[in-house]
C-alpha cells in the first residue's frame, strides 16, 4: 500500500533553515507530481509547493523565494528546503502525490512538525 513518511522537522529560530524529506512507497513515484502541504494550528491544510514529474515547480506566494521543493526519483523521495523561516511557518508539514487538479491522491502520513520560535 502507499506510504508517505515525512521527516526533518523540529524547533528552529526565526531566520533559520530546515530540510524536510518525504520517503514514499507503493506507487510509481517518477510518474507523479508531488506536493508539500502544511497545516498550522487552527487552520486548514494548504498546498505550499509542488513539483511535476518533469521537475517544474510551483510555490504559494507565502513561501516563494524562501522554500525550494526538489525530488529524487531514484530514492522515491521529495524534499523541501526551507530558509528564512518565520513564526508564521510553524505547522505540521505533509507530503502527498498531487492530481492534475492539485488534489491530494493518497492517505496522509503522520507529518512532521516545524516550530519556528525564539
Image: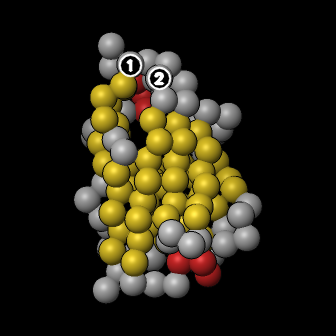
Residue 86 in view (yes/no): yes
Left or right? Give the position of 33 relative to 47: right
Q: Position of residue 93 (x, y in %)?
A: 38, 49
At x 30%, y 28%, the residue is 11
Tally of marks:
2
Q: Nearer the viewer, residue 113 or 39?
A: 113
Residue to which mark 1 is pinned: 13
Q: CA distance from mark 2 to mark 1?
A: 6 Å
Labels 2 & 1 near each other (Cβ < 8 A) = yes
Left or right? Give the position of 8 relative to 79: left
Q: Residues within 10 Å of mark 2 (few under 14, many from 20)?
A: some
Q: Nearer the viewer, residue 47 or 110?
A: 110
Q: Position of residue 41 (x, y in %)?
A: 28, 38
Colour logic: secondary structure
Image quadrant in which the N terminus is located: bottom left
* Numbered disc 1: secondary structure: loop
Residue to which mark 2 is pinned: 16
Amino acid at each position: 500500500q502507499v506510504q508517505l513518511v515525512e521527516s526533518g522537522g523540529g524547533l528552529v529560530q526565526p531566520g533559520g533553515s530546515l530540510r524536510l524529506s518525504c520517503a514514499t512507497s507503493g506507487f510509481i513515484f517518477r510518474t507523479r507530481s508531488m506536493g508539500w502541504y502544511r497545516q498550522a494550528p487552527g487552520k486548514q491544510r494548504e498546498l505550499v509547493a509542488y513539483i511535476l514529474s518533469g521537475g517544474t515547480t510551483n510555490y504559494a506566494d507565502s513561501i516563494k523565494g524562501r522554500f525550494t521543493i526538489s525530488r529524487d526519483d531514484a530514492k522515491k523521495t521529495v524534499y523541501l528546503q526551507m530558509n528564512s523561516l518565520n513564526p508564521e511557518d510553524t505547522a505540521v508539514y505533509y507530503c502527498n502525490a498531487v492530481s492534475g487538479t492539485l488534489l491530494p491522491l493518497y492517505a496522509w502520513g503522520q507529518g512532521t512538525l516545524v516550530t519556528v520560535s525564539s
